[in-house]
Image (tube, grey):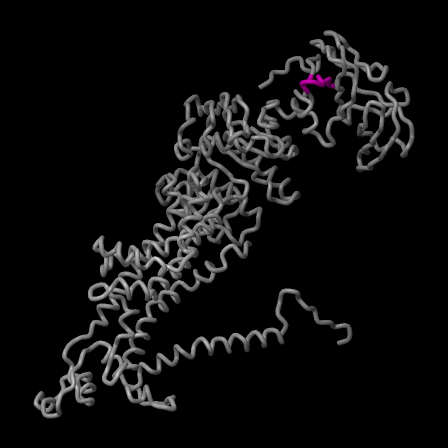
Amino acid sequence: MAEIQIRDVRKTFGDFVAVKGSSFTINDGEFFVMLGPSGCGKTTTLRIIAGLELPSSGQILLDGEDVTFNRGSERDIAFVFQLYALYPHMSVRRNISFPLRVQGAPRAEIRQQTEDVAKLLRIEHLLDRGVNGLAAGDRQRVALGRAIVRRAKAYLMDEPLGALDAEFRELMCEELRLLHNRINATTVYVTHDQIEAMSMADRICIMNLGEILQVGAPMEIYERPATKFVAGFVGSPAMNFLNAQGGIAPGAREIRINGAALGMPEAREGLDTQSAILGARPEHIQIADDGPLRGRVFAVEYMGARQLVTVDTDAGRLRVRAPNTTRVAYGEAVGLSFDPERVVVFNPDTDRALKSALYDGDARG
Amino acid sequence: MSGASTAYSVVEATPRGKLIAGVVVVAYALVALIPLVWIFSTSFKSPPDSISYPPKVVFEPTLEGYVNLFTTRSRQTDEYIESLGPPETWYDELVRERNMVITGPSRFADRYWNSIVIGFGSTFLAVFLGTLTAYAFSRFKVPLKDDLLFFILSTRMMPPVAVAIPIFLMYRELGLSDTAAGMILLYTAVNLSLSVWLLKGFVDEIPREYEEAAVVDGYTRLQAFIKVVLPQMRAGIAATAIFCLIFAWNEYAFALLLTSGNAQTAPPFIPLIIGEGGLDWPAVAAGTTLFLLPVVIFTVMLRNQLLRGITFGAVRR
């Protein structure tokens, strides 16, 4: 178990900047998820932590000890690969026990621990099979087993569920989280799937284009996105963005869209750009006849418990999560009202969220 | 059985197709095997049977060819042979029937041993160096990688014999002419391009994650190579070794040019087995039969690996 500190880590491949000066700390025993679209540098960061890549500059600290230039084998970190990387010439038992055999543990202990891990992952019956004939889910378990069979300082996982089908992925998500609750090891998990991230993480780190945009608990990321990208990436459907008027004074509680005034959390800083972007989650918008913003229904998607209504307004198209009792039809003119305490205002030039009452008490990083 | 219909698979052969394929394969096998069967049967014929016309298919087998292959003999008068007393061994007896006595062993065993040393030695070296080179080309950033690989391949673009004269002169100056070391070096050099290119294909097929996993689990890079990469290259190494061995084993032109008394291999020696009244065909056939054995045994031993090796990359799970 260990705390992992990443200090100003930069990684470039030729002219391409994969990771731009990241700094963050992963706490001891935490389930830390790095989330971002493909190519955002999350896997590179993970590989730097594991010692599979050297950073171009910056430091990696494991429990306060600088391991930046230590080989992977000297860091005592376990890694689960996206495509499992099970040794095809070894049986399941030999695959799982591999790290123990490398360490030269006594035979009886190897046997005992391998079987314990297999039992934990419910693959005891496969121990003496080869790995080539295994189903994807079982391979994944073997790969996990190979990681957790030894008490490493940290467990790094690179999209370990990426190759599984949806149903199985959900199940494995749950199991992974339960497994983490049981062994309580520092885990760094890389994924591009926000649902995996939200359901498992203690904290999430969101990256895009090599840059860390926000680090925080899932709820914080969802409710108080630091940038427009974070707001758009997390949540399904994504947050709605509307073009609003800029020029917001500190302490303002209103934002104007096409002349209509909408309530917003009290601004803690001013915004002096010409325009602004108003962000609102679909569930924070209501269809109400007296709503300040008017639009025309473009589509209605019935989702069972809820329905998703797409409305075209002058300020942009937005989607509303409405109760399934609301009766609206295509082409109908509707009014929209916004939950004034929940909307977010973004600076259109920097894409950063405007500090407001919503962010009070928000500790970033 | 109305409504029963036969499903035709796109990829599976129809019975008719299988029959045609079978006939073609058998016909080809016959064409390919007849020379081998001919050599094998000739090696057990007596010299007169071997040149009789029409050729004898049924004949009385004799080991005379093999005895002649391994011995040198001289023709003697009946009186002299009688004065020697009764023959001590079956092969003495066989030879005396033709009015000859054995004067000593032939050089075939030496030549055969040379072939084994040079063939297997150069194969081992070519595969060993090829494996390391292929791994480096596949995994590391080598400056001018593509040019180097092309250069390695380009050594194969002309027939090796085209450089026979420079090599002959160079070897004479270096004292490598007619030495086993020289021949091993030469065959290794010729085979290396093949082995690097073949093996690089195999290493490229092995995902890097295996080594990375091994490194994270506590192995050094070299240990990861030996314990994780090498076992997965088995098929490739076997296939490459067979190709290299077949080349080195069968090579004739350089062996004829560069070797004579000391390091001569079997290929240039076998055609020179002259017997009574011209070529001793049964002895030549016997030499050829024995010459074929090691490659056949080696190939049979590695055939499971070979099959996977030759179709490498063609099928992925």
Tell me which corner region of the image, top left, top right, bottom left or bottom right, holds residue A70: top left
Answer whether residue A122 is magenta in the image. no
Q: In this view, does B71 lie above or below A258?
A: below
Query: Is there any visible trace of residue B305 in the rendered image?
Result: yes
Of A65 and A28, the residue lying toward us: A65
Of B274 and A210, the residue lying toward us: B274
Q: Is residue B116 above or below residue A267?
A: below
In this image, B204 relative to B286: left or right?
Answer: right
In this image, A332 relative to A71: left or right?
Answer: right
Answer whether residue A349 is magenta in the image. yes
User: Residue B109 in the image: x percent, y percent?
Assistant: 22, 70
Q: In this view, does B54 lie above or below A222?
A: below
Residue at x 47%, y 48% (from the top left corner): B204
User: Residue A257 in the image: x percent, y percent?
Assistant: 82, 17
Quadrant in which the C terminus of chain B appears: bottom right
User: Residue A206 in the image: x percent, y percent?
Assistant: 61, 26
In this image, A358 relative to A150: left or right?
Answer: right
Quadrant in which the N terminus of chain B appears: bottom right
Of B79 and A209, the residue lying toward us: B79
User: Residue A16 in the image: x percent, y percent?
Assistant: 55, 30
Most frequent secondary structure within the magenta stretch:
loop
Residue at x 67%, y 18% (from the top left corner): A350
Query: Is there any visible trace of residue A187 in the rendered image?
Result: no
Tell me which corner region of the image, top left, top right, bottom left or bottom right, holds residue B191: bottom left
Q: Residue furthest left?
A: B83
Q: What stretch is highlighted in magenta?
A: A344-353
Q: Is residue B261 above or below residue A324?
A: below
Counting labels gives 0
In this image, A136 relative to B102: left or right?
Answer: right
Residue at x 51%, y 43% (from the top left corner): A143
